[in-house]
Amino acid sequence: MKLIDGKQIATDIKKEIAQEVREMVEAGAKQPHLAAILVGHDGGSETYVAFKIKDCEEVGFKSSLVRFEDDVTEEELLAKVHELNNDTDVDGFIVQLPLPKHISEQKIIEAIDPRKDVDGFHPINVGRMVIGLPCFVSATPDGIVELLKRYKIETSGKDCVVVGRSNIVGRPMSVLMSQKAINATVTVAHSRTKDLKELCASADILIAALGAPEFIKGDMVKEGAVVIDVGTTRVKSDQTKSGFKLKGDVAFDEVAHKCSYITPVPGGVGPMTRVALLKNTLLAAKKEIYK
């Protein structure tokens, strides 16, 4: 069993991005600029945005944070999105999800200029991804593909099972894994899938992205499988100072000894999700997707 060290790979990629940014600026190009809109004071969102700002500093990006309280109206938020769309200094921006219930997340996502949609959620970017055109790919699937490539994990002709069908992870992940660059044969499983245990146990590559702590047990994984754990659920714990612990979708202690490769939680997919956003912002700054 070999641990896939997402933290180390993310560090390596950040160094590569920082070097490219230095060269761009020295050549007279504008410093890449990532902006984030944060609504309310959700603890997870606050932490995630703070990490994004720190990441920007590390690679030499300019970053901006726009804050709104929970009672912001949909019209006010849309107005800010349009303002950022038209701000020539901002290369890419994100609207941190989730949003308050009185705001339509889909309406906000669709209002973002696809050329600045570095989260890769806009239907135009999703559609371009599906048919294999250059696009901004959503961060978590992009990060997973990068891990597979950097660890030189064989994917061509392999049976891949993706457990989870969200628009942010499961669906785009299944599309990417089936494309010619990866060439896996993909099955998307979910809560209504029959014989789920047997299906998972047939996978050469198992990607767990359902948001259910330790759902994937030892008897659901075959010997030698590659297991990618996307789950990051905070559960109560008396073993940490914070009183919480991050749990993945995979029962690590049951599964790890059976795997050829496995991602830990934390330190696996999470750091790659953050670095994928930086990659998209750099692409946006270089105008490499939409020429």
Image: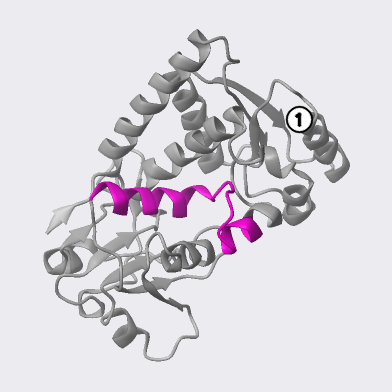
Query: Would you name the residue on which mark 1 appears?
Result: 84
- Residue 60, percent from left and from top: 47, 17
287 up-or-down from 217: above or below:
above
Give the image's coloring scheme.
Answer: one colour
Which portion, as a residue range, is magenta? 126-151
142 displayed left or right of 226 = right
- Residue 225, percent from left and from top: 21, 70
Residue sitting at x 31%, y 60%: 228
Q: Quadrant of the N terminus?
A: bottom left
238 displayed left or right of 62 = left
197 displayed left or right of 63 = left
Q: Quadrant of the C terminus?
A: top right
Q: In this view of the protein, can residue 88 be seen by the observer?
A: yes
In terms of depth relative to the viewer, which is nearer, 142 or 104?
A: 142
Residue sitting at x 38%, y 46%: 270
Magenta region, main secondary structure: helix
Magenta span includes 191: no
60 up-or-down from 108: above or below:
above
